[in-house]
Image (tube, grey):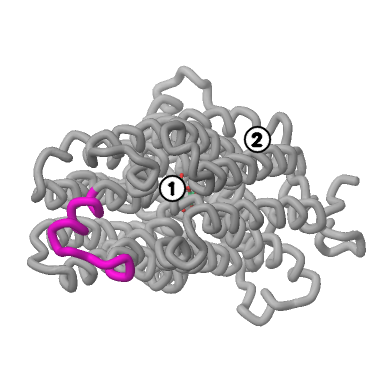
Amino acid sequence: MNVDKTSPAALQLKTFIYLTAGIAALAGLLFGYDTGVISGAILFIKDQFQLTSARIERVVSAVLLGAVIGAAFSGALTDRFGRRKVIIVTAFLFAIGAIGSAFAAGVTPLILFRVMIGIAIGVASYAAPLYISEISPPQARGALVSLNQLMITCGIVVSYLVDYALSIGTNEWRWMLGLGAVPALILIVGMIALSESPRWLVSRNRVDEARSVLGRMMPGEDVDREIDTINRSLVIKQGSWKEILEPWIRPALVVGIGLAFFQQVTGINTIIYYAPTIFEFAGFESHKVSILATVGVGVVNVLMTVVAIWFIDRIGRKPLLYIGMAGMALSLGVVGFAFYSPNLSGAVKIITMISVMFYIASFAISLGPIFWLMIAEIYPLKIRGRAMSLATVANWGFNMIVASTFLTLIEKLGKAGAFWFYAVVCVIGMVFCFFYVPETKGHTLEEIEEHLKGSKSFSKLGK
Ligand code: BGC
């Protein structure tokens, strides 16, 4: 950028980027809010509709089923209709889903509206970061990707706070779910005010519109040169589904889908969606206290995500993954032990609470941000979009499997057994990381691609 940083043009650019980041924040916030809100609401929904474990799991995982569907179609939809339009329609779905679930007369309509919200989340989890990455300058792109994860965690905390504030009567769960409509409406208005992604406009041959957006984004810059660059990269980016399966790309696919598996099957969302339920298992008497403890979980999640963002480019991804997964395995082991030992009943509460906090902190510095970051780093340019959406679908699919089997797992293996199961998966995850995951810190995306093409194992990048 050859613009003076204090010039009006540079200020205009900054405002533009912050506005865009604000929109990202809202889509991420909605993702977090709508997935987190169910944790407190489910306690009341369960009581009101007298739900069995299987029905509870269905209400919780309805969003995830929708998210798998939404993520699967997100690439095709955003390519055909544009990022901006798709995000606007998505925001409408968020709003209708939130209001619909608030007024649901029974469990079936509730599940259907939650599936609708899920579709919106699935599309947004791909479309919003894509839109931001396309509209932001390269030097700010990395920070904005991580900002998205930070906003997801903020959305989760906001949902926990709303759950806490509203856990006063039996019917307030309707407000908990309905309030999700507020950020959705702001997102609609915000997106209407923003411009379409110039990259997408160029890809649809709408060059004049792209030129005018770029003119506003990069005052004082050579807009035609930028359009040339976009055109060139569009030619490279036309990889097909068949190319994704080429042998040299396989190690990157294994890492993306593997990390999706370990991010989810180490049990993060049993905590995010069921923390109050777990605290009640541990002996917290009232719904309100359990939800308050859960707010603590949410705050730790946000703070440690900030810590992760600070460390990620300093000590690297792999050390954080090892430290985080070791911490997760240890704390899950302790939670299991607390539930297992019949003599610990008085201490169970405290031990469970501390271990759950330690677990969430360990996740937030490792698998939380690193999964989303790595799937944006490890794939060769020409298949990046498709491979990323594949990893996103896998993530939501594994998420759904875990959320829809957690309570049943507890019934079959016992509480201790269920948490030990996730602990074992953490240990396997560390072994997976050692053998398959490359250290991408400090490498350009081109170096990562070159290494993938070479004969050395992918995990030996930079060695
Ligand atoms: C995961 C979500 C999870 C959230 C918790 C995200 O990275 O994909 O499944 O609920 O982190 O912070």
Q: Which residue lies furthest to the top in this view?
A: 6
Query: Where residue 41 appears, x then y in whole percent?
Result: 22, 50
- Residue at the (51%, 63%) spot, across then down: 413
341 relative to 9, above or below: below
Query: Which residue type carries mark 1?
Result: Ile
Q: How many labels does the image show?
A: 2
Quadrant (top left, top right, bottom left, bottom right) of the N terminus:
top right
How far apart in space, not on screen, are marks 2 and 1 (Cα)?
24 Å
Question: Which secondary structure type mostly characterizes the magenta part of the structure?
Answer: helix
Q: How crowded is mark 1: few (under 14 residues within 10 Å), some or many (20 or more)?
A: many
Identify the image quadrant of residue 365: top right
- Residue at the (28%, 52%) spot, across then down: 38
Q: Report whether 396 appears left or right of 235.
A: left
Answer yes or no: disc 2 within 8 Å of ligand 1. Answer: no
Q: Report whether 7 appears left or right of 60.
A: right
Q: Name the residue under label 1.
A: 271
- Helix, strand or loop for disc 1: helix
Q: Report whether 457 appears left or right of 11.
A: right
Query: Which residue type carries mark 2?
Result: Ile
Q: Where are the magenta residues, as a range?
A: 41-55
Which of disc 1 and disc 2 is earlier in sequence?
A: 1
Residue 52 lies in the magenta-colored region: yes
- Helix, strand or loop for disc 2: helix
Q: Mark 2 points at which residue?
A: 312
Q: Residues within 10 Å of mark 2 (few under 14, many from 20)?
A: some
Q: Can residue 224 be seen in this view?
A: yes
- Residue at the (32%, 61%) spot, across then down: 60
Identify the image quadrant of residue 362: top right
